Image: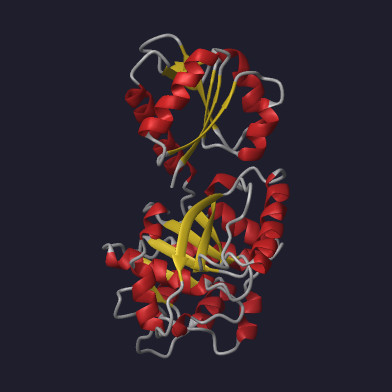
Amino acid sequence: MKIKLSVIMSDERYLKKFMDMAALQYSEKLDLSVFTQAEGTAEIIKKNRPDIVLSEKEYIERIAELSKNSEIVCFTEEKDVHTWNGYRAVCKYQRFSDIYKNIVEIYAERMEAEAVILKGDVENKKIVTFFSGAGGVGASTAAAAYACYLAEHGESVLYLNLEQTGAADLFFDADGEDNFGRVIYSLEMATGSPAVRMENALKQDASSVYFYSACTSALDMLELNEEVMERLFEELGVIKLFQWIVVDMDFSLAASVYMQIERSYASLFVSDGSEAANAKLERKLAALEIVAEQREQMLLNRIFILYNRFGSRDGKKLQNSAFKEIGGIHRFADAGIKDLLKLISQNEVFGEI
């Protein structure tokens, strides 16, 4: 996944050299846009949401005012200066490889800072949430495959299906009679330690992925209101069996969805690249952009697009989207669920999350 970098400075000769070096050495690592004047630049940067903006001093305040989703860095002429007026600073008079190294370090630190930590235990847990851009694009399969990917790489992971009619049992199986209905009941009772009951209701697939079997009735899922959802993730934070939670969730314009995006390390919207799916996905992403204006904790830079069941003939990516694409997964024909999870989990795209 490329780092989205914008550079704004008045020195056109230097800027041309900067562009040439970036194209020559790091074309696969940087998605670069450059600007030579302040007029209109701030609005463009606000719309495009670069990860990092390298800016000369005189432009910084205006850029920072409109670009809460970007890391603003002072592009300074002074050597051995690492901050300026509270902003990180990078000296432009050094080897381009050193400038790139600074950019990578700032990007990595920003990603870690944006990771929202679960409430509860002091141990850190990362939540990755999958939403469907449109029906039938394989978002649940992609989420389950990502859980398998993490398990295969030695991570302890819970696959948590929160779809109203979803079922983790489609992908994972293990003995035991408990299901997610017991979890909801424990949270609603709000007595004792729900985390103990929740841990007892957990099952573990042969792939090492933890999961909850589906509720006996899908109507039980209607009890997952904002308050219950908040407590669900607080209590999951206490359980020490896993460090990652992969959430598979229906998308709606409800506050519970916005809260889930805010608590997630990353949120992935899945499309198959078809015209209908992309049209629906664009509407959902446009709604999120509007909502993010009112919700400071909704970090649009932590929302990504993943293409699944993508075909080179009929699949097309969104055009001119400010949301990052982490890649695509091609179609697998005539594969059973377990084989499909295995095939998808081996896709390199998951390493970009």
Residue 157 seen anywhere in this rendered image of the structure: yes
Seen in the picture, residue 21 relative to 28 is either above or below; the reply is above
Seen in the picture, residue 93 relative to 207 is either above or below; the reply is above
Residue sitting nearer the eye, 197 or 170: 170
Across and down, in percent, residue 116 comes to 49, 49
Q: Is residue 236 left or right of residue 220?
A: left
Q: Residue at x 54, y 12 (%)?
A: 11
Across and down, in percent, residue 217 comes to 60, 89
Q: What's the colour scheme?
A: secondary structure
Q: Is residue 137 left or right of residue 127?
A: right
Tell me the quadrant of the picture where the C terminus can be found. bottom left
Seen in the picture, residue 142 relative to 41 is either above or below; the reply is below
Residue sitting nearer the eye, 252 or 318: 318
Q: Residue at x 71, y 26 (%)?
A: 40
Residue 203 seen anywhere in this rendered image of the structure: no
Across and down, in percent, residue 220 comes to 62, 82
Q: Residue at x 60, y 19 (%)?
A: 36
Seen in the picture, residue 92 relative to 260 is either above or below; the reply is above
Q: Choose top left, top right, bottom left or bottom right for residue 282.
A: bottom right
Q: Residue furthest front?
A: 313
Q: Is residue 166 left or right of residue 134?
A: left
Q: Is residue 47 left or right of residue 127?
A: right
Across and down, in percent, residue 292 comes to 68, 47
Residue sitting nearer the eye, 239 or 279: 279
Q: Residue furthest top?
A: 78
The mark total stands at: 0
